[in-house]
Amino acid sequence: MDHRPQAWGRPRDDVYGAYDHSFMNTNSHPNQHTQQPLVTGTSVLAVKYKDGVVIAADNLGSYGSFARFTDVKRLHTFQDTSVVGFSGDISDMQYITRHLHQKSIEESYASSSANKKSRLSAANLHTYLSKMLYRRRSKMDPLWNHMLVVGFDDDEKPFVGSADLLGTTFTAPTLATGIGSMLAQPLLRTYAGTDEEAAERTKEEAIKVIQECMKVLFYRDARSQETYSLAVVSREGVEMKTSEKLENMSWAFADRIKGYGTQTV
Amino acid sequence: MSAMFSQNPVMNGPNYSFSDAPRTNNGEFREHRFNPYSDNGGSTLAIAGADFCIMAGDTRHTSGYSINSRMAPKVFRIGGSNSDQSDATIALSVCGFAADGNALRDQLDTVCKIYRYRHGKPMSVHACAKRLSTILYNKRFFPYYTHAMLGGIDEEGKGAVYSYDPVGSYEREQCRAGGAAASLIMPFLDSNVNFKNQYVPGSGVGHELKERERHPLSRPVVETIVKDAFDGAVERHIEVGDNLQMMVITKDGIEEIMLPLKKD
Amino acid sequence: MTSIGTGYDLLNSIFSPDGRNFQVEYAVKAVENGGTSIGIRAKDGVVLAVEKIIGSKLLKPGANKRIATVDEHAGVVYSGMVPDGRHFVDRARDEAQSWRQTLKTPIPTSELASRMGSYLQAYTMYGSVRPFGITAIVGGVDGSGDEVIDGVVGSGPSTGAGGKVDGKHGGPFLYVIEPSGQYWGYYGAATGKGRQAAKAELEKLDLAAGNITLEQAVKEAAKIIYNAHKDNKDKDFELEMSWISGVDGPTGGRHMEVPQELKEEAERLARAEDESDDEEDEKKDEKMEE
């Protein structure tokens, strides 16, 4: 008989072993918060032109290779002066857009007049978002996105900036995320390789090159879709279209492609 | 299974079947870790002269084989009295993981600005160099993955270059190359700035040999060395190119020069 | 003020024998001395307006706003002690934000009024606090229930289960919250020094019939404030007005200042009315003299 009351009614240590508390001890196994992206969006493209910026992304939310959501808007307007285009994890995108929404409400506390310009330029927003991403990567709990921020900088010049899950940032006259940086960026650089060249391009030229690149991406990116969103940011504001469709696609070239996989003839 | 009924769980570690974090074959926890670092390429170079100092870097920003941007400077003015940094006296160059580089630059700039507000004068390069070392060392166990260099004019009016490893070990030097093409540029500098392996002709053999006398180089010579160093690096390293950014620091302030490099 | 000296008015947590909380009644006095503020619930939006008394010529015109944005779709104006009003606004913003955080959707105006009512009520129950010296007018336009989820990425099925039902909820709302914590919904509301005159004018508009448009309401609001100021002529004032329309209206569902041109037009009309009233008065006076 065990005379210690605290041992009564418990599994006997000599039969079952001492109770193991270690599963409650967080140091006994690794933290498991580091995630991976689940529902994802593919490339975002953006180019400058003389009076603004054009940005586009398709409306697909992929679950691995499964085309899970076909109506996902990945371009988000901020205060009618900037647009953020997201690739990567869709739930992190929603977290960020909600956060930005709250920020813009807080901005409107100070000034609610309609004719006053936003205090935050796209360049400011880009800095803000990249610090947010860098902070999270430093906590080893990243926001799994690569985004493009477009609009104007503090000197009222067109602005295109990139920020990714590591907090890496850069700007360029044309930018593309994900597979778009391989397939579309070379085409975009023929449209405008420098800011000087971009300053000579018209809105129509910018939209055209973006459409061509979306087409190339739809042909070759397995995680893409033909309905997409396209936004033009100019000094007048944001012109957002969310149900554009790629036209005049032709797969006639496909039967002439040879040399992949097991195909030998 | 036998471990589950162990009499001494404390020594054997966790031994309940439901504590089943994934493990590798040799019993280690399998950790699919997020990699918080990347390499954004590029190269930097700093040379000190008698009364000036040149900090240089290319402006290419890469990820793997992709060029992200052709205009992403790596040399920054530090500790000016406002955001345009027009009255800065110190320059910092950072090479490696660009996000860490930017964070480091922001932190050092803040420190220098606070110093300026408190003391009513800019920080000396000597003090700033020590502070930068401390900042880097503070993140010893999650380092800023950068090769940093600091340039300025010291309290005697001489050009000063300090170079760092990612965890804050540092040294004042005559010149230093950093980043992707450091191993290409550094031997060139050894020869052309420090005259290594150069001896006075006819001064003897073996230990009798006299090294060629070193002297501080003039500004035009240093500028030429910098340009040549980068032209060479661009030729041989894919991560270097686009534009050459040079900051010339003299007692009158910092002058910035931007020159084209090959874009291929 | 027969209660003075009886001792029942010294503490919030003590009732008088006839069941009154004198601290709350004194707070109402503070409101009655403040600049007039009004709110109009028109058929397609809400207008808020305030007679901002200018205490010094050294104050910058147009600065020191009295109408506050609480959330995108909601605004607040108040009469009484301005610092108390500021705190009220801070709390209202926190409530709106926490609602968004949990429900990912804008707070319904009724809910905002309810929460702020409860908040003010709590300041009538403890000996350690005093009630708010303000009466607040809360205006908002609620969405229809669809497409107002923050961060939503798609538009959902267009028909069938989960399909849309139009115009089920939403529209303009107006609430008044008093120092006691009591709040009611109104078509038109007025508080502050000139409330009696303002209420009389508001009643004439027959707002319950739903005939007044937002733009008309703006002009009426300006007239009412100018009219209410007549009894307070020795002091200078500035008119401050804000409005909220539905999503398809001029403000796109947001609470914002009335645009400069419209405000100037409304003030011009208000002044014209004022002068014609004066002329009529003068004529009457002349007739009486005759």
Image (cartoon, rainbow, N blue to C red):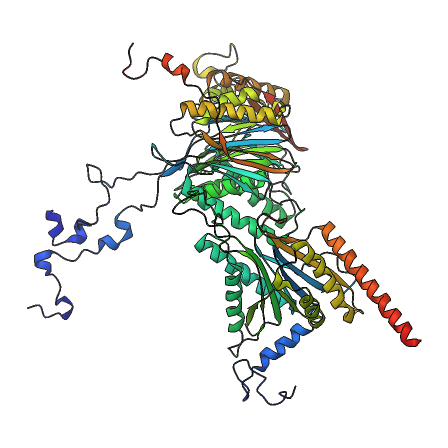
Q: Nearer the viewer, residue B89 or A206?
A: A206
Q: Nearer the viewer, residue C83 or B264?
A: C83
**Residue sticking out furthest to the right:** C290
Say which residue appears at 62% left-offset and 62% top-offset: C209
Q: Is residue B159 at least partly visible in the picture?
A: no
Q: Which quarter of the figure has residue A152?
A: top right
Q: Is residue C38 left or right of residue B12?
A: right
Q: Nearer the viewer, residue A188 or B249?
A: A188
Q: Is residue B61 above or below residue A167?
A: above
Instruction: Please state, as top left, top right, bottom left or bottom right, where the C terminus of chain C lies in the image.
Output: bottom right
Q: Which quarter of the figure has residue C267?
A: bottom right
Say which residue appears at 73% left-offset and 56% top-offset: C62
Q: Is residue B136 left or right of residue C275?
A: left
Q: Is residue C161 left or right of residue B229?
A: left
Residue B177 in the image, given as x and y percentages of width and height: 50, 25
Residue A82 in the image, given as x and y percentages of width and height: 57, 39
Instruction: Please state, as top left, top right, bottom left or bottom right, where the N terminus of chain C lies in the image.
Output: bottom right
Q: Is residue B30 left or right of residue C261?
A: left
Q: Is residue B59 above or below residue B79?
A: above
Residue B31 in the image, given as x and y percentages of width and height: 29, 40
Q: Nearer the viewer, residue A122 or A222?
A: A222
Total marks in image = 0
Say which residue appears at 31% left-offset and 45% top-offset: A32
Residue A49 in the image, given as x and y percentages of width and height: 61, 27
Q: Is residue B170 at least partly visible in the picture?
A: yes
